[in-house]
Amino acid sequence: MTAVIRLEQVAKSFGDLDAVAPSDLEVGAGEVVTLLGPSGCGKTTLLRMVAGLEPPSSGSITVGATTPSRARETKMIGFVPQAPALLPWRTVEANARLLLDVNRRANPTCAPDHVELLREVGLGDFLHAHPHELSGGMQQRVALVRAFALGSSILLMDEPFASLDEITRADMRHLLGRLCEQTGASVLFVTHSIAESVFLSDRVVVLSQRPGRVIGTVPIDLSRPRLPAIEDDPRFFGHETQLRALLHEGAGRSEAAR
Amino acid sequence: MSSRRERRRGRVESLRLVAAGVVGLFVFVLAWEALVRILDVRPFVLRAPSKIVPELLDEPRFFLDNTLTTGRHALVGILIALACALLIGAVLATSRFLEHASQPVLTLILVTPWVAYINSVVLWLGSGTPPILFMVAFVSFPAFTFATVAGLRSADTSARELLASVEASRWEVLWRLRLPSALPSLFTAARFNVGLGLAAAYFTEGGALSADGLGYAGSRAISFNNGNLLWAAILCTALLGVVGLTLVTLLERVLLRWHVSQR
């Protein structure tokens, strides 16, 4: 499998603060990889470096056979930020179209229809509503559609469901799982939710506490398509237990290093 | 439908609020009239409404023309200030250094008693419209500039990063994100500037040797000791202010439908 995203010995420090220790990471074509770690472990920083929003202090990053900034220029990356970041003056439909409205020269020749996508995620009746009329989960669904509407083959998601309640979170990960399987995009997903990482991923990369360092990679051998019922599968629990143990280990080790 | 009933209830509520305003105004005018009569106030100090209204009705054409002139002066001056503030504010918002360098100057313009230097401006720009427009634009410029800088800066950080992730140009970010984010603070500044700009138009008309405008009528009234004319000009200026604020509010209703303040 060829790597669509490749990080080699990538590290980041802000002044004296080491945010990310030298790390290697690969995401293959059509693969969903999750970065799992406690808050403040540098997983968001890693993602931002891949998105070209932050330069690494050392190491090299390849995104789609080119540099992150070049990938950004050619709109190869669909980015989903932590907050929905919808523009309050735009309707749901116009928000879903936002990324297509800027830097138009780099627009793909055949992007999926954003209105169709909105219908698919259950927002067909809200095309002309404004963000303040939507619930948190609905706003985040618009944010997902906005990224998918770019039709890009690389998706970067920064804890998009962190601010939602547990029930909505579950719905959202099921929805996102379906969308990812449909598009076959390569996804790098950041979260601190174990259930999210197991449900969505082909591989979970566990990071230690700051400075973030890869302490283990767990392949998730659950079949696709993944339906919500899979969360009751004993293998699902098995993976959850395994990841929880790794996270504890990571916390303990950096505790001892201090 | 409950939403329709709610809307109707909202409409009744807003009608009641308008009615409350009218009642308040009516009581105020009555009290004014009564006070002037009971205390026998001298004509030049304060005129009773019953004297001002006939003055207006006596020469409606004269007052209408002058009100329109002053209104035009204030409007054009404020629009000039807004255009300059948007241009300069957009530049200032790009650098903390420039912003801080400009702050003392803008504050000075704002706090200096501008009536005091009107004559110097008239000497510089000559009589007629130019000094009037200059003064209106000059005094309303700082508030607009502060509002532009603060507003452009207030754009949501996540949305900025999102646009950066697809390499939106500076211009696209300004147009699609920063400028709409600046609208709420610009409207606040516009409210403030309606009163200020109108006062600047009035006083500069009085000093600019221009032969029309409410300010000119007012200053002539003072030199001829004509209390009725003076108070009629003051009333017209106040009405202009009401019209100006109403226009700003209506525009805000349309452009800021999405904003918290309009819900």
Image (cartoon, coloured by chain):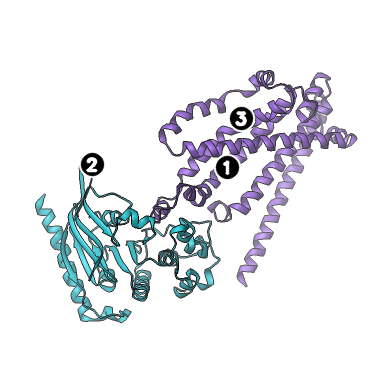
Chain colours: A cyan, B purple
One can see residue A86 in this view? no
Foreground of the two, A11 or A7? A7
**Badge nearest the viewer, 3 or 2:** 2
The image shows residue B27 at horizontal and vertical percentages of 75, 42
Q: Quadrant of residue B208?
A: top right
Looking at the image, is B166 positioned above or below residue B114?
Answer: below
Which mark is first along the chain, 1 or 3? 3
Whole-Å distance between the Cαs marked 3 and 1? 16 Å
Q: For the N terminus of chain A, give its image quadrant.
A: bottom left
Which residue is the site of mark 3?
B139
The image shows residue B240 at horizontal and vertical percentages of 73, 38
Amino acid at dot 3: Val
> Residue A62 vs residue B112: left or right?
left
Please determine if labels 3 and 1 lie on a single subunit. yes
Name the residue located 32 percent from the left edge and 80 percent from the top edge.
A227
Amino acid at dot 2: Gly
Name the residue located 45 percent from the left edge and 28 percent from the top edge.
B101
Report the disc number at residue A15: 2
Report the disc number at residue B188: 1
One can see residue A65 in this view? yes
SS for callout 1: helix
